[in-house]
Image (cartoon, rainbow, N blue to C red):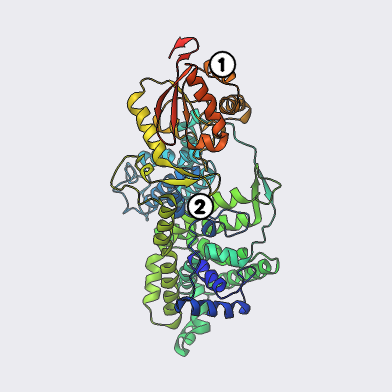
Amino acid sequence: TVLAQGVGGLVWLGGGSTEGAPGLEALQPLLAGLARWLSGRGNLPAFDYWWEATRIIPNTINEFPFFSFLFADLHPHMMGMPFALAVLVTLVGLVDPGCRGPLPGLEGASRKGQGASGPIPGAWGLALLALVGGALGPLNTWDLPTYLGLAAVVLVWVGIERRVGWRALLQAVAVVALAGALYAPFYAHYAAPSASPRFEPAHTRARYFVVVWGLWLAALYGWLVPRWWRGRDGAGRLWRLAFGTKAARARGLMRALSPASLPAARRQLALAVAVAAATVVALLAGEAPIALLLPPMVLGLALWLRRGRMEERLGGLLAAGGCLILAGTELAFLADFLQGGEWERMNTVFKFGIQAWLLLAVGLSAGLPEVLEWVRRRGFLPGAWAVAMVALVAISLAYVPLGVAARVNERFPGGPPPTGTLDGLAYMHTGVYRWPDEEHPIVLRYDYEAIRWLLENVRGTPVIAEAPLGYYREGGMRVSSYTGLPTLVGAHQLEQRPAAQVSERASQADALYRMDDPEATLALMRQLRVRYVYFGQLEEVVYGATSGAKFEELVRRGELEVAYGNDRVRIYRVVSVGGEAG
């Protein structure tokens, strides 16, 4: 996305348009924009760390892990990522007998059933897998089938390799069952929203798909294709026969014609022809992403099924799994509450895209030794690919400083936030955000001062009323969240419960601020046993100054008193609550 924004900015600076597919017509404004920028006669647009980096494929969200943690919204996909990585790390420990240090139980309890590739996992390793994998259900349910299914496949595969297939199958069933049992209390009270699969091709344009996944595709092709060429079976021999030196071609011809080599050569040739044909069909059908994903997906599966290093074979499986997930999002989606609108594929692409990121990252790391070995060989192709990859990685990594700087400047225009502290409120000293538009800055320093007063002076758990606003963009419910005091309707309630169970209380909380009659407001406060009323910047933006005026009127009548105040916040204490003295 850094490269795409840079090129788009230069085209814009040169007077061109960034709409539509890039072509030769964009070359002239690109060069003109580059000349203007280098000569100091124009500036590139400000770097967009958010929208332009994560809304590339139309009507979808294309987040990536670094952005998720930079944006720092505590969404399910972000909470699930560490647990998903823990599952993958545990699986690496299962297939690699050398990875036993931090994973107790992976070495097995006895030598019984130990095959040529190493021991089988013990009870503690399986329990760990069930614990971290099962946690994905409550955290981010979209991840649960993917990672538990992957764990079951790897367990059975490792068991077959170590000649204990039936026992491994039982272990896989036990892990899935234990993962459900450990979190049974959650499922006992969980009502899943309705969602059904719809098979409908996306026809994503190649330019958008490559902007999001181009780095991964380049890395996959640079690992899997040379690995296939240089294999000891028919693929490598076919390659040497077609493109090797005269001596290599002669030796390759003799080996290829030998009875032992013919079956492998036929299989590899058939595989190559089938993949090429399927790729052409996908292109003709307008599914460019499928065409790009098919070769690495098939080659990853082929690597997994070959004999070789277990960890590299696992990498092939993970890479193929990542490609399969991406291909699946191009062909189908889960119809949820967005069904029927132009954003109906959003959650499917978003949630499964994060899974693909993690699977591809871990899978490619297993192939790094083979890639380095290939690059060390002299030749045009390895050298050209290495130069291109270094450039792509460097450009992609530029997002880190650019994105962090843009995010910090956006959220802390008054100066950098405090560092080196564990105080979760410290950012409010300099933090500013704007809602509902740029004309309404919310300066968090004033809320911070009021919240500190509440923490230091309020005893017990009296009910505090604040505007019942969402926390996602509005920043609502910040007072009850930071003080722990109960409020009329929690910020999480609409996320965890059907709207019918929450709507009445939410309406009452809204009415407390919206109604004009001071007497009716006081009666509602007593009915809900409200002890404190918070009126800050958000409340004034939403309800206006007249809402604050009725609270001041109640102060004049002696029904409320001002417990705390600063330039932007007033905290009122109800003198009597439900007929009792406040």
Question: Viewed as shown, does residue 412 lie left or right of 526?
Answer: left
Task: Point out which mark residue 78 bears.
Answer: none
Q: Does residue 564 lie above or below 165 as drawn?
A: above
Q: Residue furthest front?
A: 556
Image location of residue 522, percent across then percent down? 54, 18
Q: Mark 1 points at which residue?
A: 523
User: Quick one: SS at disc 1?
Assistant: helix
Q: Nearer the viewer, residue 178 or 267?
A: 178
**Image point (62%, 76%), residue name:** 23
Label 2 neighbour load within 10 Å: few <14, some 14-19, many 20+: many
Under mark 2, the amino acid is Ile
2 vs 1, front mark: 1
Question: Viewed as shown, does residue 502 lie left or right of 563?
Answer: right
Image location of residue 452, percent across then percent down? 35, 32
**Image point (42%, 76%), residue name:** 387
Image location of residue 230, percent across then percent down? 45, 74
Image location of residue 289, percent across then percent down? 61, 64
Image quarter where the C terminus lies is top left
Q: How far apart are marks 2 and 1 (CA)?
A: 49 Å
Q: Name the residue under label 2.
A: 354
User: Quick one: SS at disc 2?
Assistant: helix
Label 1 neighbour load within 10 Å: few <14, some 14-19, many 20+: some
The image shows a total of numbered marks equal to: 2
> Is residue 260 visible in this depiction of the protein?
no
